[in-house]
Amino acid sequence: MRPFDESTGTTAGARVPATGCPVGKAAMGLADPMLYSDGDYHPLWAELREKDHLTWQQVDEANGFWSVANYHEADQVLRDSHTFTSERGTLLNILGVEDPAGGRQIAATDPPRHTIMRARLQKAMAIKAIERQEEMIRELVLEILQPLQDGGPFDFAEAMLALPVAVGGVSMGLPREDWPWLAKLLNSSIAADDPAYRRPGGTQETLDHAHRQLFAYFQDIYGERRRNLGDDLISVLITTEVDGRTMTPGEVMSNCYSVLLGAVVTTPHSPNYMMAEHLEDGLLDSWASDLSVTPTAVEEALRMASPVSHFMRYAVNDTVIRGTRIRAGDAVVVWLGSANRDGAVFPNPDTFDLRRRPNKHVAFGIGPHYCVGHTVARVTLKILFAELLGRFTDFAYAGEKSRLQSNFISGYKNLPITARPR
C-alpha cells in the first residue's frame, strides 16, 4: 500500500528493492515481499529479538531502516508520536519518499490533529454502535459461508478476503454490486507485488491503477453522499470538522479508502491463519467443543496471525532504543508479528492457547494509531468463528494453499478446503 496523490493521479514513490544487508544477517530480506510468500520469516524475527541492540538494514544507497522486533520497544515507538512521526510514511514500500497523505489521512497524521480527525469516526465505530449491526454481520457471514455446505472445494481465503468489504460496504452505504470490484482493487493495493494482482506493467502500474480507480469511485460516492447525508461512515467523515472547517473532498476520499482498506487488512487473515495452520492438529475441534472460548480464542488468532507485519515511523529527534542511538530522520520499522511472539510478554509464545489471558497483542497496533476499526473486526471475527465452527466439521484441504506476496500483510490468498455440515 502506497499513499495516493489525487492531485496527480499517481502513487508516491517507486518500489524499494530489497538488497543484501552488510550489518545483520537476521535483517537481510525483511523488506522483500517474497520472504512472506515463499520463506520463513519467524526465525529471522526470533534472531532479532535475542539481540541487545537494534539492527540496521541498508536497502539501497540512500535508504535504510532500524528493525524493532521486541514488544516493549514496539510499544515505545508506536506510542511516542512526539519522537516518532507517522506523517512521512508508515510502510516500507515508500521508504525515503515523503507521504502525500501526511497530515490529511488519519493513519498518516500525528496528534493532536489526528485525535480530532479520528474522534467522530471512532464514536461511530464504538461497541454499542457495532452491536446494533450484529445481525447484519451474521447474515453476511452466513451468505459467504453458504457454498461450504455443498461439500465441494471452497476457497476459504477468497471468501475471507471478500468478507470485510461486505461488512464495510454496509457500514459505508456502498452499493452491493460494487463489493467484488472493490475487494479486488483493495487487495491489489495491499499486495501489488503478488502475481495474482500485479498488472503487466509491474508493481507500480498495479498500484497506480488500483488507486486511480478507487479514488475516482470515492469521488463519485462523495458527490452523491454530500447531497444525501445519512448516518453511514462516509457521512460522518463529510461532516467532521478539523481546524474549524469540514474535511476537503480529497481528505474525505483518502480516509474512505483508509477505513475500507483497514478492514481488508485486519479481518480476513486470522481465520485464514487458523485454517492454514491448524486444520489438522485438532485445535479447531477443541474450539468447536467449547464455543465459550471464542472471545479469548479470537484474540489468540489475531496474535498468532498478526495480519499486519509492520508499521514504519521516522525519528523526529535523536533518541535511544534498546541501547541503540537513533538519529533524527532515521526510519524505524516495527515488526508487529515479531512483537506478538516475544516470550518476555507471552509465555510459550509459539503455542496457540485458546484461553490465553492476559493477551495484550499488538495485531491492531498500539498507541494513538490503534486501529479505529478494531471493534468491527472483533465482532465480525467472533460471529464468523461461532458460525463456522458451530455449523461445520471435518475440515480438510482440497488443494494447494498459497500465501500473499507482501511485506505488509501476512496472510493467504488461496486456501481450498472442504467441510461437512453438522
Image (spheres, rainbow, N blue to C red):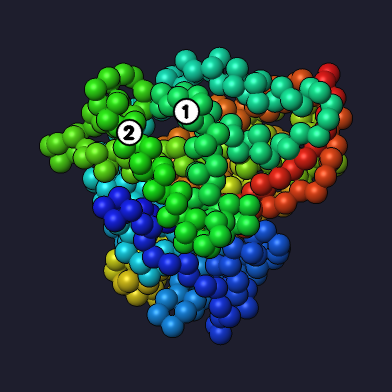
**In the image as oriented, which residue stretches furthest toward the front?**
200
**Disc 2 secondary structure class:** helix
Residue at the (68%, 28%) spot, across then down: 385
Position above or below: 154 against 71: above
Q: Position of residue 160 (x, y in %)?
A: 64, 35
Q: Amino acid at mark 2?
A: Asp
Residue at position x 79%, y 22% from top?
149
Tell which of 215 and 22 is nearer to you. Answer: 215
| Residue that badge 2 annotates | 220
* Numbered mark located on residue 169 in the image: 1
- 275 sits left or right of 32 in the view: right
The count of marks equals 2
* 410 vs 282: above or below: below
Spatial CA span between label 1 and label 2 = 15 Å
- Residue 163, x across and y down, in percent: 58, 31
Quadrant of the image for the C terminus?
top right
